[in-house]
Amino acid sequence: MAEKKQKVVVYSTPTCTYCVMAKDFLKEHNIKFENIDVSENRKAAEEMVEKSGQMGVPVIEIGKQIIVGFDKEAIKKALNIK
């Protein structure tokens, strides 16, 4: 039974090492995601803080779940990656 694909959004900045690692990890697992550069999009930055309570990046939104930072295990669990 195929799982319904959850929408994945990565709030990041171009200079953030962990953001790059998170995006590379998603790409490695063929996970499509929307990247939002919060350094250029003030409205998105405010939205990210509202959702996560955090100013730091990356903030990864998987479905309704918010993961702060590059937490590989949490991402794998949220996406059912073995």
Image (cartoon, rainbow, N blue to C red):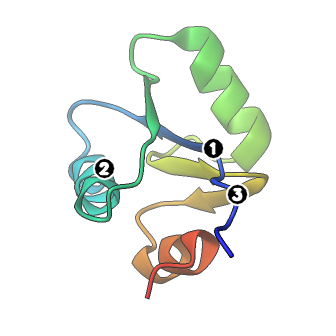
* Relative image position of residue 32 (x, y in whole percent): 42, 44
- Residue type (three-letter) at the residue carrying disc 1: Lys
* Eye-nearest disc, 3 or 2: 3
Q: Is residue 47 left or right of residue 73?
A: right
- N-terminal of the pair, mark 1 or mark 2, is 1
Q: Quadrant of the N terminus?
A: bottom right
Q: Position of residue 66 (x, y in %)?
A: 68, 56
Residue with the mark numbered 1: 7
**Callout 3, which amino acid?**
Lys
Residue 3 higher or lower than 64, as above or below: below
Q: Identify the element where label 3 is drawn.
A: loop
Tell me the residue that label 2 is attached to. 23
Q: Nearer the viewer, residue 38 or 27?
A: 27
Q: Which residue is mark 3?
A: 4
Which one is nearer the viewer's eye here, 50 or 10? 10
Query: Where is residue 15 drawn, in percent x and y?
Result: 20, 35
